[in-house]
Every structure is written in structure tokens, then in C-alpha cells.
Amino acid sequence: MKKGILSAILPAILLITGCVQQPTAIFNGDDLSNWQFIVEENTVPGEEVYSVSDGIITVKGEPLGYMYTREKYRNYTLELEYRWVDEESNSGIFFLIEEPANPFPKGIECQLMAGKAGDLVLLNGADLNEYSLPEGVSERPAFPVITKKEPSNEQPAGDWNKVSITVNEGVISIRVNDLLQNSATSEVKEGHIGLQSEGKAIQFRNLVLLPL
């Protein structure tokens, strides 16, 4: 009897296990072969700005630019950790990149600027349904912002912060250190993912893309 029950259950377990989406490797831990580099005015080779050591990506912060995935992605949760190497500064995680451009793509930025991690910045003409012009403003600013919901909950320079970005059919949620900081909706459903160089050196590790 027990053998018969196990025989009936095992195929169901295997079916459920087979349906679980496996993480997508956007960073192999060794090199940046599946990323492309943008450097403002192409002043130096990208390899001088973006590098890997011991499974950690280091982005120098100068010159301005970003690295982005060769592939576009749709319906996922992106999880990663970041920290400032020496002092708090400015950087960002780009997603829903429609068109790579120099020095800013058309896409959305999850702001990592110290004290503002979790803000959403609309880059190069990108849009989110929740954005509206501030009261008294008649012209769209160069970098429109949807401000984060909660007070800053970032770790100091040298300590790791965790960021989670979920995009599901254009519905976006941003978590910083497990706290929901922002949400929005986009008519754009897929795009490249990028890590920005701006300001001072920043490091990233444990990049995981979980398909939904």
C-alpha cells in the first residue's frame, strides 16, 4: 500500500519540481563577458572602469557610464548587493532599458545615491504611469523622479546593502534591505539591465535574476 502511494506521489513531486523556474545567470562570477560597456565620450576602455575580482564587480564611478546586459529580460526579480568602497556617493541600477545610449540609456533607474536609494529616475525620455509634473512646474525635468516611500534605510559605506527589483508585466516594486521603498507601472515590459558608473567606486555581488 505504501509503495503504491509513493508511486503515485513521486511523479507529482517531479512535475512540481520541474516547473520551478531556475535563476538566470546574468553574472557568471568570473568576468563580464555577457555585459557591454558604455563610457562617456569613450575616453577610456570599459575594462578600466568595470572589473571583477573574487566574484565582486567593481565600478570605478569615473568616467560616467554604465555596463548593461547583452540580453533583454521580462518578468523577473533581480536581487543583488552593493556597497560603497570608500565613501558614499552616487550610482544606480538601470532596468527596462529600451535603447542603450551614451551616457544615459532610455530606461528606468533605481537610484542608489546615498540617502536616496529606492527613488525611481526616468532616463532619456522613459516614462512611468505614476509620474506627473510637480505642482507649479510646466516643463518635464531632464531626470524626472518618483520619490521613495520610506525614510532612508541604507547601510553606511563599507557595509553591504540588498536591493530587490521586481518587474512583472510592467508592474514594478523596489525593496532596499527588505523594505518596500517604491512601486510603479510601465507600459514597457522588457529591457536590458545595467549598473551605473557615477561618482565614486561602488561594488556589486550576488546578482541573481529569478524569472517569474
Image (spheres, rainbow, N blue to C red):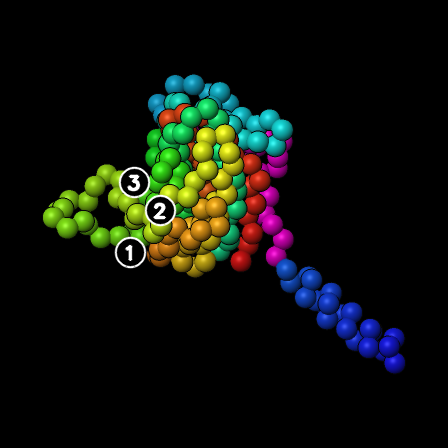
Q: Residues within 10 Å of mark 1 (few under 14, many from 20)?
A: few
Q: Amino acid at mark 3?
A: Asn
Image quadrant where residue 208 sits: top right
Rendered location of residue 76, percent (x, y): 51, 53
Magenta-drawn stretch, dominant element (helix, strand or loop):
loop
Residue at which label 3 appears: 124
At 28% across and 45% down in the image, what residue appears?
A: 145
Rendered location of residue 85, percent (x, y): 48, 26
Check contact, mark 3 vs mark 1: CB within 8 A: no
Q: Is residue 17 above or below residue 154?
A: below
Front residue of 99/64: it is 64
Q: Is residue 149 left or right of residue 71?
A: left
At 52% across and 36% down in the image, what residue appears?
A: 160
Rendered location of residue 137, percent (x, y): 14, 46
Residue at which label 1 appears: 130
Magenta part of the chain: 21-38
Q: Amino acid at mark 2?
A: Pro
At 26% across and 52% down in the image, what residue appears?
A: 131
At 30% across and 48% down in the image, what residue appears?
A: 146
Check contact, mark 2 vs mark 3: CB within 8 A: no
